[in-house]
Image: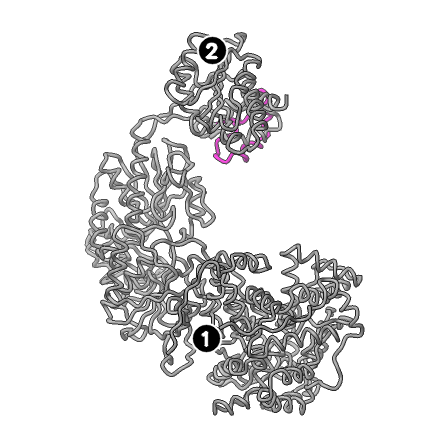
Amino acid sequence: MEIHRQVKYEEELDPGFASAVAAEPGGEGIWDCLQCGTCSAICPVSVYMDRTPREIVGLVRAGFREEVLAAVSPWICTSCYACTVECPAGIRITDIMYIVKRMAMKEGIRHRFVIPAIEEAFVEMVRRHGRLTEGRMGIKVAWKSGLRNAASMVPVAWKLLRKDRLKILRAERMRDPASLRAVLDGVGARPAKRPTPKGVPA
Amino acid sequence: MTEYLYYPGCSVKGAGQPYERSLLAVFRALGQGLTEIDDWNCCGATAYLSVDQDMALLLASRNLALAERAAGKDVVAPCSGCFLALTKAQETLKEYPEHRARVVEALGRAQLAYRGTARVRHPLEVLLRDVGAEEIQRRVKRPLKHLRVAPYYGCAILRPYQSVDDAHTPHVLEDLIRLTGATAVDFAHKSRCCGGMLTTGVQTVGLRLVEILLDAAKQVEADVIVTTCPLCQYNLEVYQDRLRKVTGNRYDIPILYFTQLLGLALGLSDAELGMDMLLRVPVLAAVKA
Amino acid sequence: MSPDERPRIGVYVCDCGFNILGTVDVPAVVEYSKTLEGVAVAREYRYMCSDPGQDLIKKDVKEMGLNRLVVAACSPWLHERTFRKTAADAGLNPFLFHMVNIREGVSWVTADKAAATEKAKVLVRAGVRRVALQEPLEPRREPVNPDVLVLGGGIAGIHAALTLANAGKRVTLVEREPSIGGNMARFDKTFPTLDCASCILTPKMTAVKDHPNITLYTYSEVVQVDGFVGNFEVTIERKPRYVREDLCIGCLKCIDECVYRDLRFPNAFDLGLGKRKPIYVPFPQAVPLKPVIDPHDCLYLKLGKCKLTCVEACEVDAIDFAMKPERVTVQVGAIIVATGFQPFDARRKPQYGYGVLPNVVTALEAERLLSPTGPTEGVPKLKDGTLPKTVGIIHCVGSRDENTNAYCSKVCCMYSLKLAHLVKERTGAEVYNFYIDMRTPGKGYEEFYKKLLEEGAKLVRGRVAEVTNAALSKGETGKLIIRVEDTLAGQVRRIPVDMVVLSVGMEPQADAREVRRRLNLSCGSEGFFTELHPKLAPVSTATDGVFIAGACQGPKDIPESVAQAGAAAAEALALVDRGTVEVQPYVAVVDEDLCSGCRICLGLCPYDAIEFEAEKKVARITEVKCKGCGVCVVGCPSTAIDQRHFRTSYLLEEVAGVLA
């Protein structure tokens, strides 16, 4: 059995992390957290998370930057907003999850499952065509998520294809996607080239 | 006859086609006009917010800016995910002037003006509030007697803005079900998340969430579940066989859009309502049309 | 001082140690003051309010014949009274003094020394110009009625009434319900001593009944309050009991003989959990122990048809169906408001299933289930009559929640621990408490908490998200499931229980707004009545002569309610024992020659102090009611109203002094 020493020194924390999160829309609520745990209790997927929503807010406030960005929790969040509605302190926890996701994306922190990859594929496709072609997204996801997962998607695809609900051949696109790109570029450039993915910290 | 702008969203053009078909058919039958917004773009859903906030706001607000051009017309957004994305963008821009300024500037480069005045609405609420229960009742030609229908609200139309109904004690979907003559069966978890993208991304979790909902509907012996969102409909419908493989429990529940249910009661044809595109359809008692 | 006597003003600028001197160049201000018109002397002193400081002023008044005084120092709130007394001691009318604030308004809020000094000079100049115009005034004295009215017969009202009555004062105690006792009468045991609530309350209730100085009006409400401090006229409406209190001997045979054999109607005292007949006493220890007939339930009063077995049974002919609401007027010098609280309506938290799921009860309902006089004779049972095997107590229901009430209701942690102990004792059930923080600050409270811990109470630190009957596993079928994050264990848990107790918070009474209006009280954002000062005047209000005590002022437990009741009684005593009350002379006065009779001022006055004199067709201000707010002065289109000591001419002169 391996024995680890776990203590957190102040210099290992990031004192600016909480403020950075609080500076984003929805993040300003972190200061009001009572750590009551209602969010974790109402969250339909908290039982699958490595850090519950309450823990995420607590860790953000204390400056545990590494732990928060490495957490799998925000990626499992489905944005159902149950936590936001129930929170007695009026904190928009769903928005805090989005903030953490964006920060993790920017730093290229990767997880073993496929959701960040899906979201990037989404962004790319919308940039190119202005809209999503679901069937084509499905293929991208299958490609990125490995053989086993891809194999499990085949029956689903087949069912939809038979009912003419799977669009692959004809892309769903805007008449003038360039006009959308002009707008997107106007606000802050293309998503930058991704830095080399970092491993998940131990 | 009220004219509405129509924001379809990507899903109803794909797996959610039955929704679009039935929506257009029902609105037509009830004498309401829907005009698709010209050259709309993807609303960004939840994916964009995880990548870049300003881009997400832009995607949504471009559509709102387009809608504002047709001043006075409300926007009907059938996909609950799109409905929420558009509403959330509008609310965020109202509350955070810095982000609003950036978005307004970026939209300006494409000669689009944004004022934040577009009214984004979900067809469920539009039908009940604008057309009204009385009028709908009057037009029901084929009451769906003896059909036990479970109302599945999903998340987005109730949370966080509660603009369609109260998040804790919603009833509008049940009201609609009753108007069709069917029996609305209350079931637990009627507004619990279906898992959204998780069925694709993290299947073990996604399947479990779907299982909980299907079990609850089975428990109350629902013949049909009606939904208000293409992703919910997809999740509940398409994974029933997979669930049987994984858990051994059999689920054979047709998952309809509420517009399809209403359309059936209004006497519209299966083809018009995209019923043939569903994997499973309910068996309706033979009723005089 | 005669009108043509020239003002001889003394200006005294205080260093206030370093508080003022540190920022304001006081010597410069003194020098500047000497140059102002009318100033005979200007001095600096370290602490003007001290005895030597005051003596300095008195000496100057005598030796230099000063007839006006200006002190530039701290806020008038602190020392205006001090210096007025100084003036009076020196033989000068106290209202010929003016205080200029150069501390809170200048030295404490200005960083730049030059700017601060400049500002101080300007303010002193303005003050000097004002004081030159001031006229001598006499404070008014009004007689005070020694009787007191107490509104509300809960523990606070009872204690206040007894304290005053024991001091020899005549007290009228008005209570809305058929019996006094309030919410405390509903409790089984009280924390932290586990005293039986009724056992400690009923002796006090009996003392009220028996006290010769207390007139008790139950089943009555105060409908109107007129008058002013020391001289209130209160109108009380007595609801008809249909049983004559003066004749009834309390044998209760009428209840036994009522045509309704069984108990059918919900009893409000039992919060609807218990039942009663149309003729009833709310609980066995009720004071007065006289029945009351509910006209909505009684056959005779509703339909006019009944065998009237109650009338037959009554040996003293006390039942009188012809009774009507009766109005009584009392004159009192002070009023104590002790109207208590209502529990938070648990239906506002649909997440917890109250009113929808079976066996979800509020804490107050749980008290009735635990009380030996309650519907289950002291043993909490489930709807089906069986004993619960597991019970979950949810703290903070409706409290500490932006969606309902943001404040903490103070008593719920303690009563939840108490309920845990009692439920376990009576039923043997496993009890869980779900809390955010455990708040046990009072005397003996931490010890009580420790006792519960040692008893093995299952305390889970986590706020419950929902109570549901949707089972997800076999062990959950047929149970109420509590989904909570056990934050201390770091784990989300699903806990199946048989019964849920909701620890609801305290709110102001439903009719608090009406009571406020009748008594001219203000309230905070949550609706509780506002005290005059949160630290130093917790039982007085901004309305002179009206005091508050108990939960109507804010959530609190029994010891605090009793303490406040005693405090309010003391304040009331101080007021009425004085015999007279001094009223500030800052009243508004109508110049009847200028008054056009437009009556605009009548509607403006928040204190109802202005009347229309129909004969002369002018407005007339009742001096004793006027609080000097100045609204009528501003509102009068004919500038017919002016306010003593705050005359328009003074204010304009002060402004001119600033702008000069």
Residue positioned 58% across, 32% down in the render? C600
Q: Which mark is residue C501?
A: none
In the rendered image, residue C39, in percent from the top left (x then y), is placed at 53, 13
Please name whichever residue, C518 or C66, is drawn nearer the observer in this view of the structure.
C66
Q: Quadrant of residue B99?
A: bottom right
| Label 2 sits on residue | C66
Q: Amino acid at mark 1?
A: Val
Q: Which chain is home to disc 1?
A: A
In the rendered image, residue C467, in percent from the top left (x then y), is placed at 41, 71
Mark 1: few/some/many CA within 10 Å (<14, 14-19, 20+): some
Is C493 magenta? The answer is no
Please name whichever residue, C177 or A54, is drawn nearer the observer in this view of the structure.
A54
CB-based contact (under 8 Å), mark 2 and mark 1? no
User: Magenta span covers which residues?
Assistant: C593-621
In the rendered image, residue C333, in percent from the top left (x then y), is placed at 34, 33
| Label 1 sits on residue | A47
Q: Where's the C terminus of chain C, which quadrant? A: top right
Q: Which chain is home to disc 2?
A: C
Q: Is residue C521 above or below residue C627?
A: below
